[in-house]
Structures are given as C-alpha cells and as structure tokens.
Image (cartoon, rainbow, N blue to C red):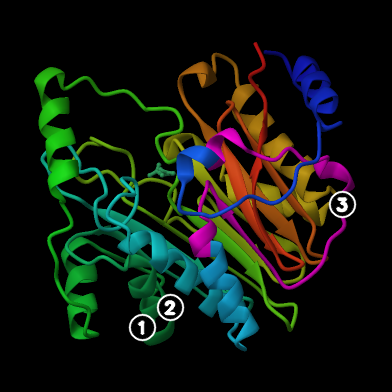
Amino acid sequence: MKRRNFIKNASLTGVGLAVGSSLASCDDHSKEEKALVNTPHNSEKGSIPLVIATWNVKKSTLKAWETIQNGGSALDAVEQGCRVEEADETGQTVGKGGLPDREGNVTLDACVMNQHGHCGAVVYLKDITHAVSVARKVMEDTPHVMLAGDGAKQFALSKGFQPENLLTEASKAAWEQWKVEANYKPIINIENHDTIGMLAIDSNGDISGACTTSGLAYKMAGRVGDSPIIGSGLFVDNEIGACVATGLGEEVVKTVGSFLVVELMRQGKTPQEACEEAIGRIVNKPNSNYKDFQVGYIALNKKGETGYYSIHEGFSMTKYQDGVNEQLQSDFFNKA
Ligand code: SD4
C-alpha cells in the first residue's frame, strides 16, 4: 500500500470508537479478549505516574503500579512487572514456558533502559527465568551493555540466579508437534497475553523501560531478535519519552523502530502519531510482505500521553493510569 493510502487509513481510524469501562478480573483472559476497550486515543489526557505494556498483562501492570506506589522507581516498576510474566509458565513467548527454537532450546532476550540513558541486555540466555533482572544486573554491575549466551548465563549464576529447565511439558509438546511438518512461518499475534515490553513513568517523572521475550517460536538456533537491541526493541529518552516493540523482530530491527518513535516524538509528534508513522515505515517499503507478519508499538511521552499501533488487528496495550488498569485494543493498519 502506498504512503498516501496509509495516511488516509490512519487518519480515518484515528477518530476512535466507543469508550468502554475498565475490565474485570485479569484472571480470565478469554473473557477480556471479547471485552476489549476502544479509546479515542488521540484526544487522551496525559498524567503520571503511568505504566504501559504490550499485550494483555494486567497482573504485570498492577505489579508495576504497586511498585511505584510503594516508592519504587520506574526501573523497579518495569523490572517487577516483567518478572510476573517471565514466571508465568502459561505464557509461551517469554521466560519459563517460552516456545523453543528448532533444536528445542528455550533462549531468552531481554533489555532494560533507565532515565539516565543507561542500559543493559542479555541475548540467547538459557536456563534462567528472569532475563529482565539479569539485564538490569548487566547495566548496573558490569562495564558492558550486552552479554550473550554462555557468558550471560555464567554472569547470571555468579549473581545468584538459579538455573532452571525453561522447557515446560506444554511447550515441549507444542515443539514436538511443530516438528512433524517443521514449517517455519511467523505467527501473527502469538505473543498475545504475555509481557514483552513495558514502559513506566514514576512519581518523579522519570522514565524507564524493559523488554523480555523468548523470541520467535521455532527460530533458528542462535537467532536474536529486536527485543534486547537498544533502539530497536526498546528506547528511552527521559527528556522526550519511550517506546517498546513487539512482533516480528527482524522488521523492527530493519527500521530501528523504537528509536524512530522517540525521535518522531522529539520532532513534535504525539506518541500515537509516532507509532503510526513507524508502522508506516515498515508497510510502505517497496515489496513489503507485511500481510504475513505483525509488528506493534507502544509509546509514552514525558507528559504521560500514550500511543499504540500495529500492522494487524489483535494487538493490545495494557495501561495503568489514574488508578485504572485496563486493556486497550490497538488500532491497526491492515484494514483490508
Ligand atoms: C522477537 N519481537 O524476538 C520478538 C518477538 C516477540 O513475543 O515480540 N515475541 O522478534
């Protein structure tokens, strides 16, 4: 689709639909999926503190919000929030229970970035559930930004993280089933229900972010996606705002998506406009095969305004603001 059509599409959908109320218990995901809230996202009022996360993760945003209410920093909030999903074995795109690569290895990618622009990341981490916390330790306790593979694991063990088998029976069974045909194709919205990315502004107005994932199901052994790559999966600039990505990491990396969104906000765009333009960069590429994959962005600015947008229907953002924890259905590009 041409850029002109993209802009037309985006402005039509920017009007928004009905405004719903916040959702009930976060235990019943399937019920929540049907009761998604649509908001007129361009007219929202910003306020802080604020927590937003990719997908349907109200337990995680609740944990992050409580962390801030208890005096924690935005960095504490995003770490604690992400840990909830990393520990949830039913989430098959993050932490324990994540779907493995083609060889049956669960390998995790994660990063954090704080209000000072400091960051830490781990890639291809095995056997350690809380990759986000290892990433924080890389930021705080090493002279480096990123540790990979065995080195990342050795570092985690030296910091007292316990080794665990991350391949649950359910994920092993799914992998065995996949191996029958071994047909590799990105699965649109497979990330639903898991924390992948979280951004927060604390009571001091400081911004931090985190991103954690087991990456694409049945990826090639050794593959690393966008999620631990600062600027692609996550970017924070405490003067401007922050962005985090989910979906097919290769496409996010090619457009340095999260940095792009923050730079667009620096130029004066709202978080919503910035997310839409960053998706536009992907879908408007000549010969883009965007119909075959999903990418979603969420963003916030210093005022506590938020934006979220994806290529396909089905993406959502969870937001905790003004004491309300709600899941918001994302507008999307591919209306055809
Ligand atoms: C990746 N962006 O590894 C990640 C996938 C993702 O939930 O978002 N998974 O490409």
> Is residue 255 rendered magenta in the image?
no
Q: Between residues 213 and 80, which one lies in front from this camera angle?
A: 80
Q: Are marks 1 and 2 in contact (CB under 8 Å)?
A: yes
Q: Which residue is mark 3?
A: 268
Q: Which mark is residue 156?
A: none
Looking at numbered disc 1 in the image, what kind of residue is underneath it?
Thr
Q: Is residue 160 above or below residue 335?
A: below
Residue 197 appears at what percent x and percent y?
Answer: 51, 55
Asked if residue 94 lies left or right of residue 117, the reply is: left
Q: What separation in Å lies between label 3 and label 1 (alpha carbons)?
A: 35 Å
Looking at numbered disc 3 in the image, what kind of residue is underneath it?
Gly
Task: Please identify the quarter of the rendering in which residue 281 is found.
Answer: top right
Q: Are marks 2 and 3 in contact (CB under 8 Å)?
A: no
Tell me where the magenta segment starts and ends, as one range.
Answer: 32-60
Say which element carries label 2. helix
Asked if residue 193 lies left or right of residue 3, the reply is: left
Residue at x-position 17% and y-position 63%: 127
Looking at numbered disc 2 in the image, what kind of residue is underneath it?
Met
Mark 2 or mark 3: which comes first in sequence?
2
Asked if residue 334 lies left or right of residue 108, the reply is: right
Q: Which residue is mark 2?
A: 139
Residue at x-position 78% and y-position 26%: 10
Q: What separation in Å lies between label 1 and label 2 (alpha carbons)?
A: 6 Å
Mark 3 Cα-neighbour bin, 10 Å: few <14, some 14–19, many ≥20: few
Residue 82 appears at what percent x and percent y?
Answer: 44, 64
Q: Which mark is residue 142?
A: 1
Tell how many labels. 3
Task: Please identify the quarter of the rendering in which residue 192 is found.
Answer: top left
Say which element carries label 1. loop
Q: Between residues 92 and 221, which one lies in front from this camera angle?
A: 92
Q: Between residues 65 and 292, which one lies in front from this camera angle?
A: 65
